[in-house]
């Protein structure tokens, strides 16, 4: 259920509505909007009775929401969510497309700083890098753990990039909170409901990747788990799903982009690296994703992908990333979006010194 307040509603009237909802054993979520404030109700196991909410001062109307996912729905919030990052101009969900780039795994200081410098110079505002890597084989490289998080924090200080990295359990999530700017929940953990709830209690934004075989509704319901715990800063990510085809690592489902925008106010990014699994496919699918209206890209970049400890075949080179940014910038302009400009050559030279 959604309680829509009048334009003239006072703060104390909104507080009174929240108190009434909580007195019923339910949870109230205040949703500020461009035109008015609404209060969403969750925690009910069946239809919610109005209990006089419609007659309270400052209330314009009470709307019953029939979808299982409530807080992520456009029924609760019509205008798109824009996520801001303190101390930075970086946003996700606004007019500027968010570009998250970097290696699949943090392998060394030299490797990480080389990639960070390249992606920052090309205009990216976010750096991705895995400190914890859930792998299919227990014998594969599992990540450097907290040592990698320390290096990622150093990169933020050196280049001003916001850090996005994956948490795989409660313990790693607590460490990620200390070092990073955004928590990634990977495809394998999309329905790890205990982890989703813990992320929902975090002060950091959450990047939620679509599960390998997840439907759109399952993805939105996973986001609902996070938001129901109080964290409204959630970003979805399409990274390819499993189908019967064998010419690509995964099937990158770009049709989910307009579908998400139709049903939800949350931003959605596209990961053409995991979505294809092959370096030569990343740039074409990145172009297509921008044309489809995504809110940003997540791309794997490595200076020496042939030596990468994970996902080298799908990691593009820094020069290829620069080309991707040029092409994406041109397409973004056509669809009414923008991408941050690359650093001028003299700034690159200064950074290199």
Image (cartoon, rainbow, N blue to C red):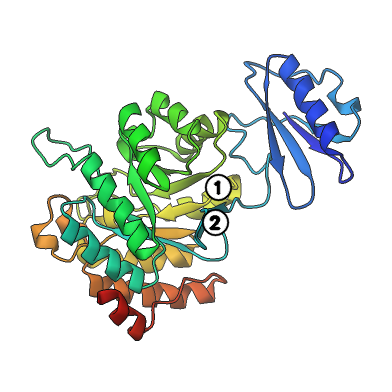
Q: In which quarter of the image is residue 264?
A: top right
Residue 117: image location, x then y, percent: 28, 68
Residue 7: image location, x then y, percent: 86, 46
**Mark 1 crowd level (few <14, some 14–19, many ≥20, 10 Å Cα):** many
Q: Quadrant of the N terminus?
A: top right
Q: Quadrant of residue 24?
A: top right
Residue bearing mark 1: 266
Mark 2 or 1, nearer chain start: 2
- Front-lying residue, 236 or 287: 236
The secondary structure type at the circle numbered 2 is loop
Residue 132 shows in this picture: no
Compared to residue 88, the image places residue 122 above or below, namely below
Answer left or right for 279 relative to 61.
Answer: left
Answer left or right for 217 relative to 300.
Answer: right
- Front-lying residue, 56 or 327: 56
- Front-lying residue, 223 or 179: 179
Residue 36: image location, x then y, percent: 79, 46
Residue 23 shows in this picture: yes
Residue found 35% across the figure and 73% down from its top: 122
CA gap between label 2 and label 1 equals 8 Å
Q: In which quarter of the image is the C terminus?
A: bottom left
**Image label count:** 2
Residue 299: image location, x then y, percent: 31, 59
Q: Do the residues labelled 2 and 1 touch (CB within 8 Å)?
A: yes
- Front-lying residue, 277 or 350: 350
Q: Residue 93 carries which label?
A: 2
């Amino acid at each position: 259920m959604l309680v829509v307040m009048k334009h003239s509603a006072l703060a104390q009237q909104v507080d009174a509505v929240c108190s009434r909802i909580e007195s019923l054993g339910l949870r109230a979520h205040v949703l500020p909007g461009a035109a008015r404030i609404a209060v969403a109700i969750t925690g009910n196991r069946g239809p919610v009775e109005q209990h006089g909410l419609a007659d309270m001062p400052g209330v314009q109307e009470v709307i019953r929401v029939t979808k299982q996912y409530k807080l992520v729905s456009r029924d609760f919030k019509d205008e798109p969510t824009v996520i801001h990052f303190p101390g930075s101009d970086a946003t996700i969900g606004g007019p500027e497309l968010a570009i998250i780039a970097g290696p699949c795994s943090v392998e060394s200081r030299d490797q990480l700083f080389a990639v960070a410098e390249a992606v920052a110079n090309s205009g990216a505002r976010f750096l991705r890098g895995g400190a914890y890597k859930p792998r299919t084989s227990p014998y594969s490289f599992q990540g450097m753990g907290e040592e990698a998080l320390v290096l990622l924090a150093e990169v933020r200080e050196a280049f001003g990039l916001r850090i996005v990295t994956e948490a795989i359990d409660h313990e790693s999530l607590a460490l990620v909170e200390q070092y990073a700017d955004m928590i990634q929940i990977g495809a394998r953990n999309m329905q790890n409901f205990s982890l989703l709830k813990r992320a929902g209690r975090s002060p950091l934004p959450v990047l939620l990747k679509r599960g390998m075989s997840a439907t759109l509704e399952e993805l939105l319901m996973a986001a609902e788990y996070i938001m129901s715990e109080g964290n409204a800063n959630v970003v979805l990510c399409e990274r390819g799903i499993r189908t019967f085809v064998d010419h690509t690592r995964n099937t990158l489902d770009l049709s989910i982009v307009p579908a998400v925008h139709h049903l939800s106010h949350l931003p959605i990014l596209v990961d053409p690296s995991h979505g294809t699994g092959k370096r030569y496919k990343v740039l074409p699918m990145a172009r297509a994703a921008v044309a489809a209206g995504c809110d940003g890209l997540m791309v794997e970049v490595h200076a020496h992908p042939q030596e990468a400890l994970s996902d080298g075949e799908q990691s593009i080179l820094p020069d290829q990333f620069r080309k991707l940014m040029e092409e994406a910038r041109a397409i973004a302009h056509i669809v009414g979006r923008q991408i941050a400009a690359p650093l001028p050559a003299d700034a690159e030279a200064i950074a290199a010194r």
